Amino acid sequence: MTSQDRILTQHALTGEWLSMTLPLRDLEYGPELCGPGSLSGTLAPRLLAQHPTLADPGTTNIYVESDGEIQWGGLVWDVRTQGDQLALEAASWSSYAQHRHDLDGELGGRGPYTNADPCKVVRDIWAYLQSVPDGNLGVLVDSTTSTAKVGTPADPYSFPFWEHPNLGDRMDDLVSGDATPDYTCTTTWNADKTAVVKRIRLGWPRLGARRTDISFASGVNIVEDPEIQLAGDDYAQVVIAAGAGDGRAKRRQISAVRNGRLRLEHVLDLPDIKANDVLAARASAERAVRQNLGTVEQITIRDTPAAPFGSWQVGDDIYTRVHNAWTNYTGWCRVTGWTIRPHAVGGPQATISLRPADTYQYGGTT
C-alpha cells in the first residue's frame, strides 16, 4: 500500500462509517471466481481495545481503497488474538448468503423452478434474503440472462422451508457446472463517491476473456517456482455425484469418459441436492478438473508491464509459461482468483490461482 491507500470500515446495517484509516498490517486481499474472495490482515490489540466497533465481526463492512478507488469490499467475519496482535479475516458479499436460510419456503413464493434460468434464481435468492428485516446489505445482482436451465417438470428446483435451505450453498449449486453462469463479487464507489456499490457480477457463457496482451512467465514476472503436482490420488475420469435421499432413493448422477488410462473413480457427496440436472452438472465439472495432471494451480508474480496489476480479471485466460529444473509448462490458464500483498518484501506481489482453460467451455466474454 502507498500513502494513497487506506482501509475503511462501515456498519453493515446502518451504513455509519466506523474508521476511514484502519491501520491493518500484513494485508492480503483479492476476488474469486464463483466465490467471495477474501481479505486478511493484523491489527495492534490496543487499537481495537480503544475502538471495539472498528471491526465488529458479522456486522462490519471493510474496504480496501487505492488511489481513490475501492479495490475490494466485504464483511469482517473473524477477529482473534495471535500472540501480540489481532488477526482479522473477511470475505466478500456472497459469503453473507452462507449465513442465511430460506425460512419461508420457495424464497417467499418465488419458486419452485422449472426450466428456469439460474441467473434468475440467483437474483431471487438475493431478493429474498435482503427483503427480510435486518438482512439488507444493499447488494445488487446483475441482470445477466443465460440459456442454462435448472429444474424439470418431473423434478422442479425447490426450496422446502422444512429443510431450511442454506442460501449460499444453493447459490454455489447454481454456478458449479460446466454449462452454468459464473459470478464474482465487486465493489466500487458510485459516480460521485458518496456511496459504495456492492455487486454480484454474473457472466454468461462465462466471465473473462482470452487475453493476448498480457502473460505470466518464469524469468519475467513469476517470482517463485510454482509447485506442480502429479497426484494419482486426485485423478479421476469417472465422477459419481451423490445427492439427497437414502438407500435406493438416493439421487445419483455419473460423469465418465474412457481415455486409455486405468479407470479411477471419485464420489462427490452432495447430500442437500435433489435436482438431477444440478447433480449432473456438478459431476461433469468435477471430472473436468480431476482429469488434469501436472497443471499449474498457483503462481506468484510481481507488477511488471508483462501483466500489470489490475490488467487481468476473474475468469480471464492468460498464456502461462513455467520453466525451471523440474518443469516445462506452457498453456492457457484461467484466472480463478488472486490475493494482492501490497507490503511484500521487494515490492507488491500477487498470488494467482489458476486452472487449465480447456476445462471450461469458452464461449465469449462478459
Image (spheres, rainbow, N blue to C red):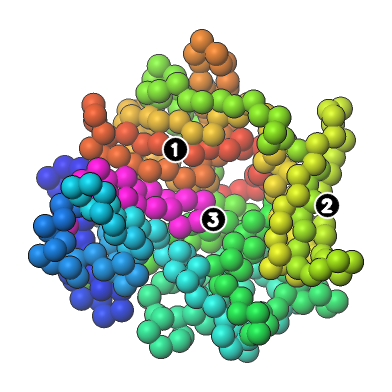
What numbered label is drawn on residue 111? Answer: none
Q: Which residue is mark 2?
A: 254
Q: Residue at x 71, y 64 (%)?
A: 271
Taking 194 as reference, is 35 above or below it? above
Q: Residue at x 31, y 79 (%)?
A: 13
- Would residue 327 be visible to someone looking at this image? yes
Say which label, 3 or 1, has the lower sequence index.
Answer: 3
Question: Who is closer to the viewer here, 196 or 230?
Answer: 230
Badge 3 crowding class, 10 Å Cα cut-off, few under 14, some 14 to 19, many 20 or more, is many
Q: Residue at x 51, y 51 (%)?
A: 33
Badge 2 crowding class, 10 Å Cα cut-off, few under 14, some 14 to 19, many 20 or more, is some
Say which label, 2 or 3, has the lower sequence index.
Answer: 3
Question: Who is closer to the viewer here, 91 or 32?
Answer: 91
37 drawn magenta: yes
Do the CB atoms of the residues marked 2 and 3 lie less than 8 Å apart?
no
- What's the amino acid at mark 2? Ile
Do the CB atoms of the residues marked 3 and 1 lie less than 8 Å apart?
no
* Residue 16 in the image, given as x and y percentages of width and height: 20, 76
